[in-house]
């Protein structure tokens, strides 16, 4: 097989708003803690080509994805369905997912972003050459905690101990899949990929520095150790998994950032050292637009919800420093958008999303534009035919949470509020429908 790797620095100028942790927080950046990048890997087997690009961003709109694919296709001839645009979901970068209120959207940056991501992809294709692929599964512990089902309240000091583990590690990823690509002629490390599921949220609402959180910091560290290499972080099922350090003051968070990043880098480093050769004799791609069903909520109910938010916002003494008020503003805006679409006759009963798969020999990358929860990933992995499977969220768009059955039944932020602040109705049965869609794509790639 052939592979090529290239990266582009996509760090915005200092002063742009940072995205995540709530609406209208005015988290304006004051410096660059670590550069953020778009890192691309191009693959070729018997003339067939595919590209995966991983961006240190909270998410990417569908419009950006489509623009990237056009730009790359014009320059390289790679088919749009063979280009996978992925985000790591860092909350310490600009608002690139189109979220209302979750950090100011910087128009100059958004105008430049598709071109920067496309340059990474084009550069990777231009560097295609013979490589030797290898794969390893490496222990990766002491990083995540399941925020839905494991209410771990460990102190900062406890979390920073090397032997810290969550109460329920089985509800998180405890292993990292590592892919290694070395130059067939020189044996030099050209590129690597690390697949792991966990919210990159070591740095939170009080932090004001630009960086890719633990994943981006770790990849930058490993690239410095291996000059000339490019390392892609592939975000897995992180919908219900946070890092063990979250919502801490800025200085504590910045201290923890290096420690958590070092833990992850250690796991990837170990995987690179023990990776075994992989036979890649075929490359296949599949892309399908699937409709995911929404709850049947009538226009009258949407208008009632709008009125409830308006009452909060316009109550006597309401303040724009009150989280309840700012969240009500977000819901008021997005619900008005939903109501307008309903009144225009738009069918909101099914929400379209791209499910994409790329196969490299025994490896299959399955991507969907959701924050996928662990139970969904595990169900797919238990049934899929692919020997080595990576279920990747935040791929080719950003459509909010895909809650598992239990979380959906309980309601709340992930199941109900989350979709609405993205301007969508809550999903009716996303767990089952997403599992079916991912398995269908796995089946196509294994024919």
Image: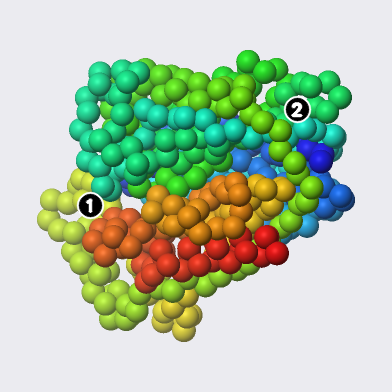
Would you identify the image quadrant in which residue 61 lies? bottom right
| Quadrant of image for the N terminus | top right
State the image coordinates of residue 295 (x, y, percent, origin top left).
Answer: 35, 74
- Marks 2, 1: nearer the viewer: 2
Q: Residue at x 67, y 18 (%)?
A: 226
Which residue is drawn at the image coordinates 60% and 46% (left, top)?
388
Residue corresponding to mark 1: 325
Residue 240 versus residue 332 in the image, above or below: above
Residue 292: give x, y in percent of width and height.
Answer: 47, 70
Q: Indicate the quadrant containing the C terminus: top left, top right, bottom left or bottom right.
A: bottom right
| x 47%, y 80%: residue | 347
Label 2 residue SS: strand
For the residue pair 420 and 182, the one nearer the viewer reads as: 182
Depicted 440 relative to depicted 197: above or below: below
Lateral position of residue 164 relative to residue 308, left or right: right
Measure the alpha-carbon separation of dots 2 and 1. Answer: 53 Å
Mark carried by residue 182: 2
185 and 242: which is toward the camera? 185
């Amino acid at each position: 097989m052939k592979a090529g790797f290239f990266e582009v620095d996509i760090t915005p100028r200092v002063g742009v708003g940072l995205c995540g942790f709530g609406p209208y927080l005015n988290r304006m950046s004051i410096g660059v803690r670590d550069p953020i990048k778009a890192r691309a890997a191009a693959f070729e087997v018997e003339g067939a080509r595919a590209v995966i690009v991983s961006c240190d961003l909270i998410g990417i709109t569908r419009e950006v994805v489509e623009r990237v694919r056009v730009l790359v296709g014009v320059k390289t001839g790679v088919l749009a369905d063979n280009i996978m645009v992925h985000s790591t979901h860092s909350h310490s970068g600009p608002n690139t997912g189109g979220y209302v209120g979750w950090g100011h959207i910087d128009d100059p940056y958004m105008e430049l972003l598709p071109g920067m991501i496309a340059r990474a992809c084009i550069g990777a294709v231009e560097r295609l050459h013979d490589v030797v692929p290898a794969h390893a599964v490496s222990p990766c512990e002491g990083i995540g905690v399941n925020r839905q089902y494991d209410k771990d309240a460990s102190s900062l000091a406890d979390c920073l101990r090397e032997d810290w583990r969550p109460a329920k590690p089985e509800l998180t990823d405890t292993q990292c899949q590592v892919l290694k690509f070395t130059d067939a002629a020189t044996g030099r490390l050209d590129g690597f990929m690390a697949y792991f599921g966990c919210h990159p949220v070591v740095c939170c609402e009080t932090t004001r520095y630009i960086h890719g959180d633990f994943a981006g910091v770790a990849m930058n560290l490993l690239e410095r150790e291996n000059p000339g290499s490019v390392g892609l972080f592939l975000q897995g099922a992180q919908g219900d998994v946070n890092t063990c350090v979250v919502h801490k003051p800025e200085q504590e968070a910045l201290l923890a950032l290096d420690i958590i990043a070092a833990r992850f880098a250690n796991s990837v480093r170990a995987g690179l050292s023990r990776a075994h050769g992989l036979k890649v004799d075929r490359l296949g791609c599949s892309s399908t637009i699937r409709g995911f069903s929404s709850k049947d909520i009538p226009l009258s109910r949407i208008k009632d919800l709008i009125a409830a938010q308006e009452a909060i916002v316009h109550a006597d003494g309401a303040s724009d420093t009150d989280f309840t008020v700012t969240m009500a503003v977000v819901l008021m805006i997005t619900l008005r958008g939903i109501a307008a679409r309903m009144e225009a006759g738009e069918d909101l009963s099914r929400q379209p999303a791209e499910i994409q798969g790329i196969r490299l020999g025994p490896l299959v990358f399955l991507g969907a534009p959701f924050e996928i929860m662990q139970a969904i990933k595990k169900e797919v992995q238990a049934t899929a035919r692919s020997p080595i499977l990576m279920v990747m969220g935040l791929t080719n768009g950003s459509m909010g949470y895909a809650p598992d059955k239990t979380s959906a039944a309980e309601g709340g932020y992930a199941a109900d509020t989350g979709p609405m602040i993205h301007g969508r109705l809550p999903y009716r049965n996303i767990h089952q429908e997403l599992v079916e869609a991912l398995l269908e794509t796995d089946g196509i790639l294994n024919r």
